[in-house]
Image: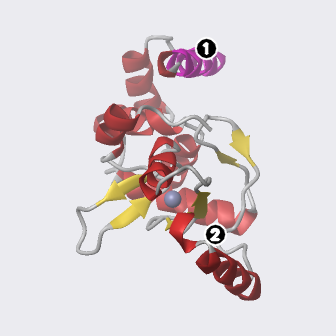
């Protein structure tokens, strides 16, 4: 399944490279792209924003050594893209590589949020609320009667929520956000399907 999706991404990418008159060999194409085409940080932000999430790191690492300017860390470009999307209400690329209508990070009013919290507390035994430490996206997971709390946590993990214990305070990273922990996560839980 994962390899099918990767293949689809690869085909899409090759088509885009051909359309841009670039060689369909990725390595050569990316080096040429980096040298002749990528203008500045803003431009690189746009390119990475249009790259499927699972290919972002590879594309970034391939472009970086060949750029005319010194690239900033990948996280910086991700943050730029999010801020720009928020400002301009741009569609963003979802975890499956499809375009999603952009939703501002704070789209729940505080009143609604409090009402939801009260509801959630009532079923706290079986509700898991995760907030992404990077983009502050919020997602709730509910357990059915026969499911344990562990089952609920596993639901979140399979959906692609990554537990990050590298910081001072352990945190969660949502399926949409880039993290170096994702490779190990996916090796353990499999690749999330949207
Ligand atoms: Zn996130």
The main secondary structure of the magenta stretch is helix
Instruction: Give the residue pinned by disc 2.
Output: 105
Q: Secondary structure at mark 2?
A: loop
Q: Quadrant of residue 133?
A: bottom left
In percent of the image, x 55 and y 64: which residue is there?
Answer: 126
Instruction: Give the residue pinned by disc 1.
Output: 18
In percent of the image, x 34 and y 42: which residue is there?
Answer: 185
Residue 132 location (% of width, % of height): 48, 64
The residue positioned farthest toward the front in the image shown: 146
Q: Image height check: is 133 above or below 54?
A: below
Residue 43 location (% of width, % of height): 54, 48
Region rendered in magenta: 4-22
Quadrant containing the C terminus is top right
Task: Decide whether residue 20 is among the magenta residues.
Answer: yes
Residue 157 location (% of width, % of height): 44, 47
Residue 117 location (% of width, % of height): 64, 80
> Circles 2 and 1: CB distance less than 8 Å?
no
Frontmost residue, 55 versus 38: 55
Residue 127 in the figure: left or right of residue 104: left
Whether residue 40 is visible here, answered yes or no, is no
Q: Quadrant of residue 121?
A: bottom right
Q: Earlier in the sequence, mark 2 or mark 1?
A: 1
Task: Decide whether residue 189 is among the magenta residues.
Answer: no
For the residues marked 2 and 1, what is the alpha-carbon distance in whole angstroms? 36 Å
Frontmost residue, 169 versus 53: 169
How would you rate the neighbour count of disc 2 (Cα within 10 Å): few for under 14, some for 14-19, many for 20 or more?
A: few
Q: Image height check: is 190 above or below 168?
A: above
């Amino acid at each position: 399944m994962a390899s099918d999706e990767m293949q689809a991404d690869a085909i899409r990418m090759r088509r885009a490279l051909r359309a841009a008159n670039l060689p369909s060999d990725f390595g050569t194409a990316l080096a040429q792209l980096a040298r002749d085409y990528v203008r500045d940080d803003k431009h690189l932000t746009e390119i990475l924003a249009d790259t499927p999430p699972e290919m972002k790191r590879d594309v970034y690492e391939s472009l970086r050594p060949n750029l005319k300017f010194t690239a900033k860390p990948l996280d910086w470009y991700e943050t730029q893209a999010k801020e720009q999307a928020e400002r301009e209400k741009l569609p963003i690329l979802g975890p499956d590589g499809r375009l999603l209508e952009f939703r501002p990070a704070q789209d729940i009013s505080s009143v609604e949020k409090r009402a939801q919290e009260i509801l959630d507390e009532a079923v706290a035994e079986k509700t898991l609320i995760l907030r992404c430490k990077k983009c502050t996206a919020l997602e709730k997971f509910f357990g059915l009667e026969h499911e344990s709390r562990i089952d609920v946590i596993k639901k979140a993990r399979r959906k692609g929520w990554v537990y990050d214990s590298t910081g001072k305070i352990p945190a969660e990273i949502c399926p949409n956000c880039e993290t170096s922990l994702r490779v190990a996560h996916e090796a353990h839980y499999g690749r999330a399907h949207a």
